[in-house]
């Protein structure tokens, strides 16, 4: 003859098990960074009006994500540095674009763009 535990005891045991399970740890740089972006290089047809203080970059699971005409996703190293390069193939040739930067404390400095338009980001963790 088998004996079953009352539902209350099972619920308590399950609750304790879930409470003591390790939580998914966020990366040390995770969060939303906001601040200024400034055009540092532009050809006559390269940059739209992108200067301003409404730049946002999101870091989740130690991956920096930024949209600049295309999505950039860069893994962040232990020292806070990150870099990714993309090549966009078009009818009139290919162009390379890059996102490169570093996070120190709550501050992030980064550069993004290509030959026609490059922008510098000065951001703080929000």
Image (cartoon, rainbow, N blue to C red):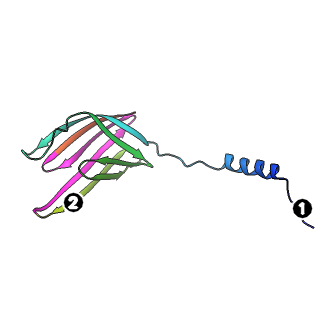
- Is the residue marked by circle 2 packed among few (<14), some (14-19), or many (20+) residues within 10 Å? few
- In the picture of the structure, the residue carrying the numbered disc 2 is 87
Residue 79, relative to residue 92: is it above or below? above
> Could you tell me residue 101's position as x and y percent?
29, 44
Residue 37 falls in image quadrant: top left
User: Which circle marks residue 57 in the picture?
Assistant: none
Residue 48 falls in image quadrant: top left
Q: Residue at x 34, y 46 (%)?
A: 81
Is 28 on the left or on the right of 81, as rendered?
right
Is 115 on the left or on the right of 62, as rendered?
left
Q: Earlier in the sequence, mark 1 or mark 2?
A: 1
Residue 55, relative to residue 83: is it above or below? above
> Could you tell me residue 10's position as x and y percent?
79, 53
Magenta stretch mostly in which secondary structure? Answer: strand
Residue with the most extreme right position:
1
Q: Residue at x 53, y 47 (%)?
A: 25
Query: Foreground: 49 or 119?
Result: 49
Q: Residue at x 12, y 47 (%)?
A: 46
Is 54 on the left or on the right of 18, as rendered?
left
Front tag of 1 and 2: 1
User: Which quadrant is the N terminus positioned in?
Assistant: bottom right
- In the picture of the structure, the residue carrying the numbered disc 1 is 3
**Range of the magenta residues?**
92-117
Q: Residue at x 33, y 48 (%)?
A: 82
> Could you tell me residue 54's position as x and y percent?
28, 34
User: Which quadrant is the C terminus positioned in?
Assistant: top left
Report whether residue 97 is seen.
yes
User: Considering the numbered disc 2 on the image, is that residue within a helix, a strand or a loop?
Assistant: strand
Is 73 on the left or on the right of 43, as rendered?
right
Residue 6 on the magenta segment: no
């Amino acid at each position: 003859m088998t004996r079953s535990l009352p539902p209350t005891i099972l619920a308590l045991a399950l609750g304790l098990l879930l409470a003591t399970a390790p939580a998914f740890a966020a990366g040390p740089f995770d969060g939303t960074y906001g601040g200024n972006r400034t055009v540092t290089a532009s050809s006559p047809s390269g940059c739209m009006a992108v200067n301003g203080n409404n730049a946002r970059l999101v870091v989740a699971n130690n991956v920096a994500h930024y949209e600049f005409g295309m999505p950039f996703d860069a893994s962040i190293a232990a020292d806070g540095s990150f870099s990714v390069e993309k090549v966009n193939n078009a009818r009139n040739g290919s162009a390379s674009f890059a996102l490169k930067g570093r996070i120190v404390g709550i501050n992030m400095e980064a550069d993004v763009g290509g030959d026609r338009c490059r922008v510098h980001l000065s951001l703080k963790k929000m």
